[in-house]
Amino acid sequence: MHQAQQQNGAGVGSVRSYGAGFALSILLTAVSFGLAMTGALPKGATIVCLFTAAIAQMLVQLRYFLHLDRSSAMYWNVMSLLFTFFIIFLFVGGSIWIMYGLHYRM
């Protein structure tokens, strides 16, 4: 079965890889929580740091837990993920556009 997973492009992580991903996730979560709760930075800087940490958290999750990388075996997985983001962007953006139009006309 292990060989069938490799042929299908399914990644298999090691305990070390999962541990590194878990540690990075905990660190990014703690940093985000600390920034939000302490108010150590101005509001604008806090928002930028939180968005940066969120993007980093997403990349850590994709790399260490979903095993997505730039290898040729992962090409279609990455393309389907990008297509999913595009569809979500269309739905959310279209909904906001429609609600803005309705609000403007009321």
Image (tube, rainbow, N blue to C red):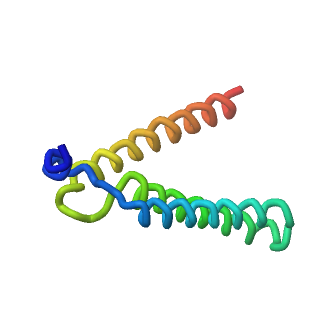
Q: Nearer the viewer, residue 29 or 15?
A: 15
Q: Going 46% across and 61% down the picture, which residue do you hit? A: 59
Q: Quadrant of residue 44 in the image?
A: bottom right
Residue 26 at what x, y percent from top left? 63, 61
Report the quarter where the N terminus lies: top left
Q: Quadrant of residue 15 in the image?
A: bottom left
Report the quarter where the C terminus lies: top right
- In the picture shown, does residue 15 fall above or below 7? below
Q: Going 20% across and 48% down the picture, which residue do you hit? A: 2
Residue 104 at what x, y percent from top left? 68, 34
- In the picture shown, does residue 102 fall above or below 75? above
Q: Nearer the viewer, residue 39 or 1?
A: 1
- In the picture shown, does residue 19 fall above or below 105? below
Q: Going 70% across and 63% down the picture, which residue do you hit? A: 30
Number of disc labels: 0
Residue 32 at what x, y percent from top left? 70, 62
Q: Nearer the viewer, residue 17 or 106?
A: 17
Q: Nearer the viewer, residue 101 or 74?
A: 74
Q: Is residue 101 left or right of residue 40?
A: left
Q: Going 30% across and 53% down the picture, which residue do you hit? A: 78
Residue 40 at what x, y percent from top left? 84, 72
